[in-house]
Amino acid sequence: MEDHGLVREGLVRVLCQLDANVSVVEAGSGDQALQVLEKDEEFDLVLLDLALPGMDGFACLEIFRNQYPSIPVAILSAFDDPLTVNRVLANGALGFIPKAYSGDGLIKAIRKVLAGHIFRPDDTVATLLGDEIPVLPSNGGVTPEECGLTERQGQVLGLMAKGKSNRDIAQQLGLSEGTVKIHVTGVFKALGVSSRTQAMVMASRYGIKL
């Protein structure tokens, strides 16, 4: 699903390289895609853009996973920051493919998903948090688990947001300070950041519930 016609045409040409008998059905919105699936559920893959008109990609992904769990879904998006990648995979997508990929890269990624493997780009760790990093708009209410954080990491992030030190967090959660440091490192990795300040910026951008 892709709302730009020219982009869809290019994708169809690339996807036809998968196999001589491949058949591609286009949809410009989530609603159109659901209408297609209601008529025919015999699809091997749904390739979904996140920035769709009307119903957004995350809502589409949830519906597809609930109503058509046997059809694998791969995300194709320009919003390839670590939180978005983690969030879509945590919500049931089998792959995340950046739009910056070449045609060959796209084909290789799709083949991996069709083989039943999870595909994620290798370079999902952001080194900067400047305005040049695109972040998919969020209406808030994103859970830590949706961003690839464990329940404990979400608790640690919430206490970090309150300005608590590792020692304070350890005392409040009944953990050793070394264990807290491990959880903090896990938070940084999931969010694609390298400091507490950057973690707070990303949490704020996404409206993560803490």
Image: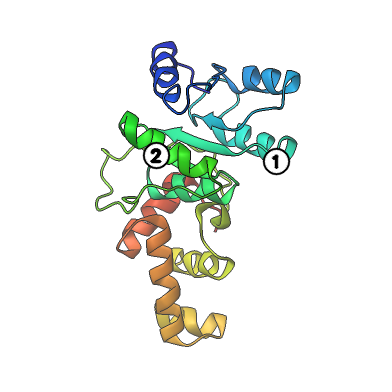
Q: Disc 1 residue type?
A: Pro
> Which residue position is annotated with label 1?
69
Residue 163 seen in the figure: no
Q: Position of residue 155 (x, y in %)?
A: 54, 68
- Of 71 and 177, the residue lying toward us: 71
Amino acid found under the numbered disc labelled 2: Lys
**Residue 28 falls in which quadrant of the image?**
top right
Q: Is residue 127 left or right of residue 167?
A: left
Q: Looking at this view, is 125 or 141 the one in front?
A: 125
Looking at this rendering, what residue extends furthest in the bottom direction? 176
The image's mark for residue 108 is 2
| Camera sees residue 193 | yes
Q: CA distance from mark 2 to mark 1?
A: 23 Å
State the mark number for residue 4.
none
Camera-nearest residue between 85 and 41: 41
User: Is 121 displayed left or right of 23 in the figure?
Assistant: left
Instruction: Give x and y (percent) for residue 81.
Output: 37, 45
| Residue displayed at 54% across by 40% down | 114
Q: Position of residue 16 (x, y in %)?
A: 45, 21
Front residue of this view, candidates 85 and 161: 85
Query: How many discs appear?
Result: 2
Q: Circle 2 — which element?
A: helix
Quadrant location, the C terminus: bottom right
Regarding mark 1 in the picture, which secondary structure is present there? loop
